[in-house]
Amino acid sequence: MKVALRKISNIPLDFDIKSNEITFKGYLEYHAGKLILLKAELNGLLDVQCNQCGEDFKLPLDEEIEIFISDGIYEDNENIELDVIESLDSMADLDEILNSEIELIKSDYHSCENCQAS
């Protein structure tokens, strides 16, 4: 789902995307300057591999996500630390953001219940 950044205003624009057993639900809202706030929840079950035994298991997700999307190159003039995604085509690709968040979670260290118990 792609959204034109110029269409986002102070009134939150809701979105709800499903991918397999995962729901990415939240809103986009104009923040300041070229920044758009994306606030969302990531819920469901994610297939991951145990880093100890190698078995596949379902990891329950309940994550809150708050990032900013910059319409163009982001320039930090106030030295405020923000998670910012730069959009060079003035579009927010929510499917790509969802996939990036999923890959970030998958890249973490995970242990199945059997390995946690031992």
Image (cartoon, grey):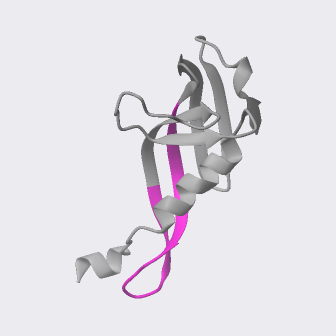
Left or right: 31 in relation to 7: left
Identify which residue, 68 or 65, lies in the foreground.
Answer: 68
Which residue does the image show at 51% across and 46% down from the upper left?
A: 43
* Label total for image: 0
Residue 16 within the segment the image draws in magenta: no
Instruction: In the rendered view, tell whether residue 37 sits above or below residue 53.
Output: above
Quadrant in which residue 27 is drawn: top right
Identify which residue, 77 or 21, lies in the foreground.
Answer: 77
Residue 59 placed where, x, y %? 46, 63
Residue 116 placed where, x, y %? 27, 76
Residue 50 within the segment the image draws in magenta: yes
Residue 73 placed where, x, y %? 60, 38
Identify which residue, 95 or 72, lies in the foreground.
Answer: 72
Instruction: In the rendered view, tell whether residue 115 sits above or below residue 35.
Output: below
Instruction: In the rendered view, tell whether residue 114 sits above or below residue 21.
Output: below
Residue at the bottom extreme? 53
**Which residues are the magenta region?**
38-60
Left or right: 84 in relation to 23: left
Which residue does the image show at 46% across and 40% down from the upper left?
A: 65
